[in-house]
Image (cartoon, rainbow, N blue to C red):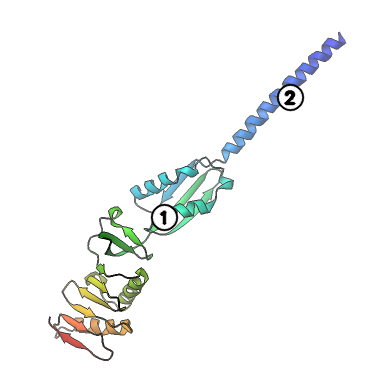
Amino acid sequence: MHQFIGKKKYILFIFLFFLTSINSQIFVEKKDSLYDLNHIEVVGLNEKLNMEIKKNLNFVKEMNIFFLDKEILEDQINKYNFIESYNISILYPSKIIIKLKQTKILGKTYKDNEVYLIGSNGKFIDIKKFNQYKNLPIVYGKFNPDKFIFLKNIIYEINLNYNDIKEIFFYPSGRSDIKTIDGVLIKLPINNVKEALIKANKIMNNKNLKNNVIDLRVSNQLILSNE
């Protein structure tokens, strides 16, 4: 009789141990899944672009949020040339929020017979994603975007109306020209560009002077003509 009771207790112990192990495993699995990334929120751009970027980041879903490598996200975000800056926030236990800032579109240019936009981040951007930008200065020649941005900053600094600029030309010599929507061509020197543009701006604001060409290429020399 005692032997039977002993066996019964032993079987009950095994059953309880087995049940406890199963419950423990379920608890661990639920605990682990609690920290699986299951929600990605992308904000800051238009709805279409937000959704596109979110979709391309779906591959990180189901990863444990504690082991999520931000560099993986950053590498993906940096592929988009139209993004100026971004911030990634991790909200435990299972969500990330990515806040994006779009670069300012400053102009457009031609590369390999294709039209590209120029961003304030110094990158060339596929115009297909931003075809709403129409009235922008067209930039010609082979140039470093940083040089273009440098010229744009001078234009803003001296209060020359950027919206009045129709075309900008960069030459292999390092010199540049600016053409306005009114047809005035400003020929700039290689050096002292700011001083030259200040002179050109004063001339264009002088109602007594009506010239189509303002030639400032030679230092300490000004040539006004109608070509």
Image location (x, y in percent) of residue 81: 38, 58
Of discs 2 and 1, which sits in the foreground?
1
Which residue is drawn at the image coordinates 69% and 23% (left, top)?
19
Image location (x, y in percent) of residue 124: 34, 62
Give the amino acid type for the residue marked by disc 1 in the picture. Lys
In the image, residue 201 above or below residue 30: below
Whole-number angstrom distance, CA of label 2 to CA of label 1 = 53 Å
In the picture, the quarter occupied by the N terminus is: top right
Left or right position of 91 against 103: right
Q: Which residue is mark 2?
A: 17
Image location (x, y in percent) of residue 218: 26, 88
Which residue is drawn at the image coordinates 47% and 43% (left, top)?
59
Q: Which residue is mark 1?
A: 79
Local secondary structure at mark 2: helix
In the image, residue 186 above or below residue 61: below
Q: Quadrant of residue 116?
A: bottom left
- Residue found at the far right of this picture: 2
In the image, residue 218 above or below residue 124: below
Local secondary structure at mark 1: loop
Q: Quadrant of residue 113?
A: bottom left
Q: Camera-side residue: 83 or 201? A: 83
In the image, residue 208 above or below residue 90: below
In the picture, the quarter occupied by the C terminus is: bottom left
Which residue is drawn at the image coordinates 57% and 37% (left, top)?
33
Give the amino acid type for the residue marked by disc 2 in the picture. Phe
